[in-house]
Image (cartoon, rainbow, N blue to C red):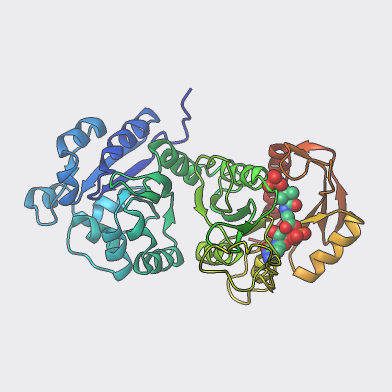
Amino acid sequence: MLGHHLRGKRILLIVSGGIAAYKSLDLVRRLRERNAAVRCVMTQSAEEFVTPLSLQALSEDKVYRALFSLTDESEMGHINLSRQADLVVIAPATANILAKMAGGIADDLATTLLLATDKDVLAAPAMNVRMWNHAATQANLATLKSRGVRFIGPNEGDMACGEYGPGRMAEPLEVVAAIEAYFGTDAPLAGRRALVTSGPTYEAIDPVRFIGNRSSGKQGHALAAALASAGAETTLVSGPTAEPAPAGVSVVRIESARQMLEACQAALPVDIAICAAAVADWRVASEAPQKLKKQEGGAPPSLSFAENPDILATLSHLNEGRPRLVIGFAAETENVVENAVAKRARKGCDWMLANDVSAGTGAFGGDANTMHLITPDGVEDWPRLTKRQIADRLAAQIAAHFRSLPA
Ligand code: PMT
């Protein structure tokens, strides 16, 4: 059965011009199935990909296209279009429309609405991987995030242009989940933003070799899924894992500790940060530009190491924009609770979850774990639970914590 979260909600959907515009048709259908009212605005280039007639038929409403249309203005001033919505969604959001938003450009109906709106905006970016990775796009994203624009996706995968990487628009059901999470005002973490790190980091030795660890990402991904189901707008920064992206979560994939730190900083501001990743404490001091060669009869190469940035400690010690609740995970093989208590103090986080990761515990890679939650109030021993149960329990305690804070 479909959720009724969206009954009566009014979505203003801006469709900009990219190949992913075809997904907007399915998005409208899914939103209508959930009883949301959808009004569509198309940019001129979107019309090269989908027709206004298709969007009109699916949304069962007029589609707005031109800024200077006397008929449209007499029926509904362009400012009113956004005022009469509960949420503005841009799907797909091209690099171009994001750049215009960041620069405050209003040269067509869609961008004028975006500049004039007093409603929250959720964007589902879609573009070529190089455009996504370009410094200009990343700077625009940071600007828009700092202004409160929400994002879902993009996902990683094969692209219409034949390349592979991040840039595919989130699937329509993922966008729906993000919209439902936004409106899920009864959800315990509705209106909160969360950041989770997950998986291992890979530290390159040369172009083909790396130093890694046995983290599977199961715990971190379960945490992101639990926070998103509890209504938080969640970004998951993940090292290389085989875990699928949790629904309704924005996933940023990285390899090294330094990339993880950068991605976490780009996801700020957030209310909650949970560092469940197994981050390498050290990287190889100088990555060899070419594959290291085995010398016949020669000695094996020796590696020297440099210290990696500590992401948990960095987030915990931010002077400006520190997340209100920073949670770390302590992986210990002896004196688990004692060492974790000291680690919490050293890294400056608010809560620490301690786990015994000795061989045979299955903490790394397994489906269950035994945790001890360390807070300023003391230590709570949890029974053995599945990683999803751990995630749900932690999400519930986080929600209770925020409820207990003064408004
Ligand atoms: O991924 P799974 O297979 O599901 O396994 C889950 C897990 C065992 C990886 C998880 O439960 C866990 O314990 N994660 C933390 C692993 C770890 O790196 O622990 P640590 O004690 O070395 O680090 C303490 C904290 O500092 C962690 O929150 C870690 O993310 C963070 N850290 C560490 C080093 C660093 N350079 N930056 C960090 O942010």
Expressed as whole percent of the image width and height from the top left, the position of residue 274 reads 66, 56
Q: Nearer the viewer, residue 64 or 225?
A: 225
Q: Nearer the viewer, residue 4 or 327?
A: 327
Expressed as whole percent of the image width and height from the top left, the position of residue 27 reads 34, 36
Instruction: Identify the residue at the far front of this view.
Output: 297
Instruction: Identify the residue at the far top of this view.
Output: 1
On the question of residue 328 being in view, the answer is no
Residue 99 as seen in the image, left or right of residue 45: right
Above or below, comparing residue 53 to residue 394 in the picture: above
Q: Nearer the viewer, residue 206 or 285?
A: 206
On the question of residue 270 being in view, the answer is yes
Above or below, comparing residue 279 to residue 163 in the picture: below
Tell me the residue at 30%/65% (across/down).
99
Residue 230 as seen in the image, left or right of residue 379: left
The picture quadrant where one finds residue 219 is top right
Instruction: Identify the residue at the far bottom of this view.
Output: 319
Residue 173 as seen in the image, left or right of residue 102: right
Quadrant for the C terminus in the image: bottom right
Expressed as whole percent of the image width and height from the top left, the position of residue 308 reads 66, 70
Q: Quadrant of ligand 1?
A: bottom right
